[in-house]
Amino acid sequence: MSDRLKVLPQYLMPKLAMTRLAGHLASKPLGGVTTSTIRRFVARYGVNMAEAAQPDIAAYATFNDFFTRALKDGARPLAQAPLICPVDGAISQVGSIQGDQVYQAKGQAFSTTALVGGDAALAAQFQDGLFANLYLSPKDYHRIHMPAAGRLLRMVHVPGELFSVNPTTARGVPGLFARNERVVCVFEDEAIGPWVLVLVGATIVGSMATVWQGRIKRGGDVREWTYRDQDIRLAQGDEMGRFLLGSTVVMLFPKSGLQFNPAWQPGGAIRMGELMAR
């Protein structure tokens, strides 16, 4: 069966209703039901609770509290490099942007303009630059950290579809990451220049949140926040956001002499803080 046929049911599913219901339930303190659910989740996905700041499953009041759990101090040392990995997960794709085209999967690509919500001037800054698509699975640590230092300039919420995000949908849904709901965060760094980190939503991802704005309300029209007059600066390795259930981050960097870690290959496992590019 082709990948397009495999994902066909997702075009028919009530994805938004399912996602809202999952988010509602995950935010409710349900006592023993919550603890039992977390316990089964940990067993099914092999979650490593030994590295969690709070390893006691019963201590989490809601499933969201568990899912966005913090790690113990020192669990993710930071590499000395211009760009470090912002998440735990797996590499979907990394490489060079071909003009304005970002490689998604065999036979699939999307434009930088579509990804950032239609802002051609912003997208033009990444012509022939670098990109990275990183997938967070259910077992992974779900806080997102800064790959480089940055001053926050803008944030754009782009409503969209809520296809699940995995290798099959990457191959079977054209322009997946530029079609799904997403939050586009635009930063500037003196050494790197402008760069973008995009949080991509998906089916059952209850919501997305940033440390400066909190949880992003979904739905409605495209919304933009500007922060140029607030001087919000985050250091490399600082937490910048989180997913309430897993999804994908997409990053764009301008053309430069930086090169990705040669060990980074599609499908490879990654950990927050490791060398991404130098």
Image (tube, grey):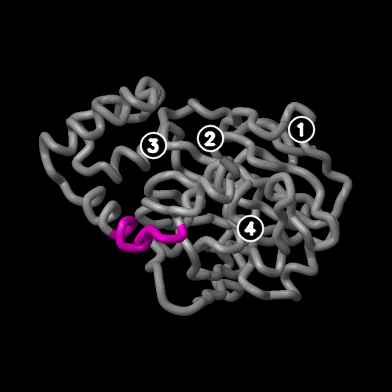
Establish if 278 lies above or below 181: above
CA separation in Å, label 1 and label 2: 16 Å
User: Which residue does the numbered mark 4 point to in the structure image?
Assistant: 174
- Report the amino acid beneath label 3: Ala
Residue with the mark numbered 1 = 261
Residue 88: give its label.
2
In space, the residues marked 4 and 3 are separated at their CA atoms by 35 Å
**Residue 239 shows up from this direction:** no
> How dense is the environment of label 4, judged by Cα within 10 Å: few (below 14), some, or many (20 and up)?
some
Q: Is residue 251 magenta?
A: no
Which SS class for mark 2?
A: loop
Work out which residue is located at the far top of the displayed protein and give it. Answer: 50
Q: Any mark on residue 70, and which?
A: 3
Q: Nearer the viewer, mark 3 or mark 2?
A: 2
* First along the sequence among labels 4 and 2: 2
C-alpha separation, residue under disc 3 versus residue under disc 1? 27 Å
Please check the rendered image and state whether residue 13 is part of the magenta-colored stretch, yes or no.
yes
Q: Is residue 88 left or right of residue 16?
A: right
